[in-house]
Amino acid sequence: MPRSLRPGLALVLLTSVIACGGAMGESMSAKSAGAPPAAEMASPSVSGDMAKKDFGEEGEPKPGPKTWKRAGAATHAARIAIGDKETLPLRGMQFKVEIDGFRARVVLDAYFENDRDRAYEGNFQLRLPDDATPYFFAFGETDFERRPATAVAADPAPKPVAGPRAPQATEPQLEKAAFFPKGEQQKLGTSAPLIMAARAKTWHNPKEARIVPREKAAFAFTETTRAQADPALLEWAGAGIFNARVFPIAAHKIHRVVLAYDVSLVRAGKDFEYRLELPDAAGNVSVDVSTSGPMTSEPKLAADVDHGRSYFHADGAPGRAGGDHALTFRASNLGNPVLTGSDPQVGPTFTASVVPNLPARAASTRDEAVFLVDTSLSSNPDRFNVFMKLLAANLENNRSTLKRFNVLFFDVQTTWWRPAWVENTKENAQRLLAEMNNLTLEGATDVGAALAASQAPPGAQNQDRFDTFLLSDGAATWGESDKNIMAHALTRGPLFAYQTGLAGTDGAALARFARESGGAVFSVVGEEEIAKASTAHRARPFRLVSVKGSGADDLVVAGRPRTIYPGQALFLGGRGAPKDMTVTVEQDGKETPVRVALAAAIESPLAPRAYGQIATSVLEEMGKATEATSRAYAIHYRVVGETCSLVMLESDADYARFGIQPEREAERVKAELASVVAARADAALQGSLADPKAYMLRWLDGLAEKPGMKIAIGEELRAVVRAMPEGAFVVKPNALEIKGRTKDVPGQAYAAELLTPGKLSYDAATAELQARRGKYGAGDALRALSSLVEQTPGDAILARDVGFSAMELGLPAHAFYLFRRVADARPWEPQSYRAMADVLGRMGMTDLAMIYFEVSMLGEWNPRFGEFRKIAAVDYVRFLRRVQKGELKTSAPAFAERRLVAMNEATQLKGADLVVMITWNTDNSDVDLHVTEPNGEECFYQHRSTSLGGELTQDVTQGYGPEMYVMKRAASGSYQVRAKYFTSQRNRASARTKVYAQVIEGWGTPQERVTEKNVTLAEGKEMHDIVQVAVTAKSAPMAR
């Protein structure tokens, strides 16, 4: 519901929209709101007197467009989940915002209460603006405690007291007592030491996170929680979503989470806008904003001016009234703003947002265009409405040049609107929009599959070139995740995308796709920009030759654009303090230097990190080739993202135990210029970043360096991989067959939850899966279930869960990328490699499956994974026998034969009447395999060998499995297979655990039969039935 914000009173209610664990119930929508991408467009009109404007000419300033209204707040939505549905109440939030030019720094204090009688591990997940880069994270108890109402003092606003006994209260004033008063908050510093010092009096034993390489951080957290110590981990989950697992959360205590980040303001025409979104939830909120220059606010707040800075304040208590869910600040006519600031260890640095004045000249146009429309869950509701307006405007405003078109709708599947090109008539456009209005927006987002499919529209000839328009946030939550490989599919013409400023846009991905295809990303931050954006692609692009600044060095441009369009904004940084800039462009073989006048520099502590953020993103694009340098920049400038995470452990000894030492990377950063390192790597790689075989070889070479890994990849395997054909490394799942796409398909409960972003529960999604499976088929069922992945990307428990479900549905190919994402995030867990090998074997991708089987066998895995290699070897033998029989084809038959001999020797298993294997999706949990044989004897962890010959592998008590039961020669009768939920995650209220079981009858024989089961283990129920196997008398003994 709307509510108002008036001067001095910000009525803010923060909603809890995150879940954790397998259930993913009520988790946040998969994307977050925020600032423009690295290479955005100002979307100039290119009609009328297009060619009259010359280089460098300025137009009269006009008010910037109003940005899109949101159906509900998206950024800063947060909660701590301690199970499928259990959450801890949020009691208050305090924001301190400093705006310098076009950059903002935000320090957020969030107060959560554990109103339970025991401590928990929780998942704190916060949605941030798109290009926000956290630099500080800390967690700990406060000195405040909430007690029963009968213990409340008469004073309605109790004061915090010193000593071991915390204040007792039930009223919301408790959290306000922890807030900094208006005057004090404005004076607080934003550096890490100052943040910690300011909160020391009311924060009990807080822990501050250290910035470390991402995989090392995740490994240290996982191992520490297993020992029930006190870590926390903040890691990037994609498109502005940051997960923070925190432990312990003490009973009956108020806990404070502090997160600080930097972000760019949204460029809206000539204006820059900062929008502080305030989600709905019970709790007090206080906001203090200071700006380097005059800014207007909406709602209007009184500004105190001191030493050239303007100060705004708003605070409030729970309540609802008319108005918006945000505070908006807008600066007008900043020109090309530049911030300068000194890095004490590196030297002077700067950052700028500039728009070179380029003439808009009409380009030759193509008669055909493909529109890619994202119909995933994250498009609902705001984004899809914008997409429809953009699509309608493109068709109408380009009707004179765009003669034919088609539309590819995509989520986890791709569907062409029509089986051939469609004439661009008003009637066809109206028909399309009417059908779009009836679509259900659900499922995860397979951007890679959509880009590949878009290059082969039905009816097009192989030589045809056409324009591609991507109406999507660009955040891939399903399928291929490597941006270089995805962009490599774009071969038929330029791709144009749009930055809306709405929640969850992966601006880096959109910029990459546009750059690699020769297209552009246009800014459409409000409805007033739609008309311009719809024709902006008709201006001729310029090749970007260079960007230089007088007095500047190591200049790096976010997104590394190769071409720019008139009106395109460049976000850049470097060393030094430039007075002006020159952007050299080329068109028709003629190079032209364009001088860019910079606004008066603003001295700001935000400048060094902005430069570091850009440099890190540019270096991260190059992968392993620049890994050491990108890691140094990320650590030095505290940039959380694809390279590094923030992790906090209990003590310095814990950091040392995991090889996490205070890493001082300043010397490397000072010596190695990001622009030089990136250019050198780009030249050396020569496009190999998009080569799947090169990707695999780099991955194999880097395995030994991963935390928790002890593995040696021999030259024999490398040679075999190098000799494999290119196609062996391209995994293309078959398209899902979807029968129901319209709004009348979803069930009532599921449909109701789809309407509110972030509210889809695990129970509703799994119930919808079962209903769709029976009515429409496996493809429709998986599409519904994949909405959970879209809602909470980066969750390993959920990825395994949905992957197992895809396998049970008979769609194993769609599980591959889910398992690979888990392996990338948690490389020390071998179950993912075994699962990928299994999936690839079923797809007939023999060569790639062998690689993952080899990784499974070559690793020396943590003993807590039991007899993993023995079980993987049994799978590998079964796979290699199919290769030997010619059922599976390989480019390395001699290698496969040698490995079969070795695996046969390792397993000593020629055949078996019955093999049962189980694995499960949650860590720190103990699931036991039980098989009751025909004579009533039970084979389980305390009785692993039976009188009939049943054998059980070692018990796995700390999560995932696997466990295996083998009966070489089975007696006639019934074998009851069950799973006992012996212990669950000790630190969570309820983490959904799902067991995936394979039952193989006649293992190693032509009569082999496989049964697969997914069983959800319910809390409070120890024993769960999986399957009952009936063995009849045999005329001859099976091979053993």
Image: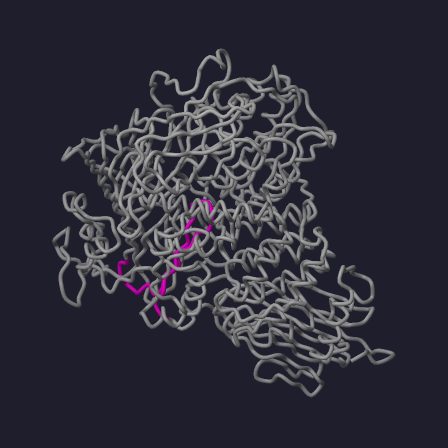
What quarter of the picture does the C terminus occupy? Answer: bottom right
Residue 873 position, x and y percent, is 67, 73
Residue 378 position, x and y percent, is 50, 41
Residue sticking out furthest to the right: 1035
Work out whether 325 lies above or below 398. below
Query: Would you say 768 lies left or right of 111 here?
Result: right
Residue 79 position, x and y percent, is 37, 52
- Residue 908 visible, this orientation: yes
Instruction: Assess whether residue 959 is covered by the magenta stretch.
Output: no
Foreground pick, 140 / 470: 470
Foreground pick, 22 / 840: 840
Foreground pick, 853 / 752: 853
Residue segment shown in magenta: 229-255
- In the rendered view, how is the structure colored? one colour
Q: Main secondary structure of the magenta part?
A: strand
Q: Residue at position x 39%, y 40% from top?
A: 555
